[in-house]
Image: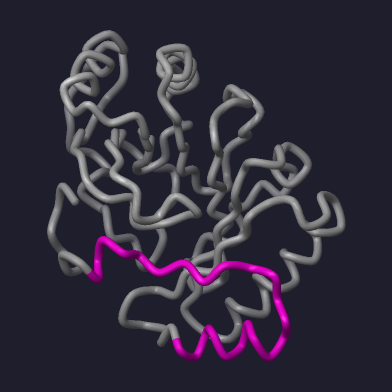
């Protein structure tokens, strides 16, 4: 049994899959309290559903890409079972996880998008950097940035990731919407010659920052 906040179909707004139609399963609960969190309703809203019920619901959307998000999906013990079930059913599955949880419990066929927290989040001490060693080539890493201090922190972390894995993993730098100007972040990236991807939250530019279910 999993506690589910909402299930909906939209456009994937982030990661290297940005722009693709995607069905989202937002699970309830989070172990972190990031200052800029834009889904605080997922801390406690939702109801219990079996894995079979979730799979049946997803089948109604006729969409092969599924994202599990939160909250923090990995604080629920049955999340890896749901991921495995979806993968066995032919879905491409993305897991958005906050960097504090051990990702090794997740089926390696899943694309694990690990969101390591920067200082302005207030949760950078919660990062489990052992997850760097657990990454597979198709996994992605995200840093959400609010200022130059965050950028410098993320840049140093990129060096650690590249040292272990080389150029394989997609690394995403995402400016906090209406806090850090994307043009400023882009200029920092270009000045430093960083091989990372600028990651804008497309859904916020399409529908605005407050609309749910997108």
Q: Residue at x 38, y 35 (%)?
A: 68
Location of residue 174 in the rendering, given as x and y in whole percent from the top left corner = 47, 69
Q: Residue at x 34, y 29 (%)?
A: 64
Return the residue found at the far left. Answer: 211
Q: Residue at x 54, y 30 (%)?
A: 110
User: Quick check: 65 above or below 154?
Assistant: above
Region of the chain picked out in magenta, as a range: 183-205
Q: Is residue 15 left or right of residue 25?
A: right
**How many numbered badges does the structure rendering display?**
0
Pick the residue in front: 21 or 205. 21
Q: Residue at x 41, y 24 (%)?
A: 91
Confirm whether the magenta stretch covers residue 147.
no
User: Quick check: 79 above or below 68?
Assistant: above
Q: Is residue 162 left or right of residue 20?
A: right
Kindly indicate the quadrant of the structure image that contains residue 118: bottom right
Pick the residue in front: 141 or 32. 141
Kindly indicate the quadrant of the structure image that contains residue 180: bottom left
Location of residue 159 in the rendering, given as x and y in whole percent from the top left corner = 80, 66
């Amino acid at each position: 049994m999993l506690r589910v906040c909402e299930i909906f179909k939209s456009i994937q707004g982030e990661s290297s899959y940005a722009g693709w139609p995607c069905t989202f399963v937002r699970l309830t609960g989070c172990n972190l309290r990031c200052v800029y969190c834009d889904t605080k309703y997922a801390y406690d809203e939702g109801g219990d559903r079996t894995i079979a019920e979730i799979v049946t619901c997803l089948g109604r959307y006729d969409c092969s890409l599924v994202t599990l998000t939160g909250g923090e999906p990995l604080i629920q013990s049955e999340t890896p079972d749901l991921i495995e079930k979806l993968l066995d059913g032919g879905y491409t599955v993305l897991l958005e996880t906050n960097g504090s949880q051990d990702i090794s419990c997740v089926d390696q066929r899943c694309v694990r998008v690990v969101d390591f927290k920067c200082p302005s989040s207030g949760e950078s001490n919660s990062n489990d950097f052992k997850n760097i060693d657990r990454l597979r080539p198709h996994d992605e890493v995200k840093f959400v940035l609010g200022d130059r201090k965050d950028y410098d922190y993320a840049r140093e972390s990129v060096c650690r990731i590249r040292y272990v894995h080389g150029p394989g993993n997609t690394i995403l730098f995402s400016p906090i919407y209406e806090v850090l100007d994307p043009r400023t972040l882009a200029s920092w990236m270009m000045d430093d010659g960083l091989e990372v991807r600028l990651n804008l939250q497309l859904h916020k530019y399409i529908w605005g920052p407050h609309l749910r279910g997108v």
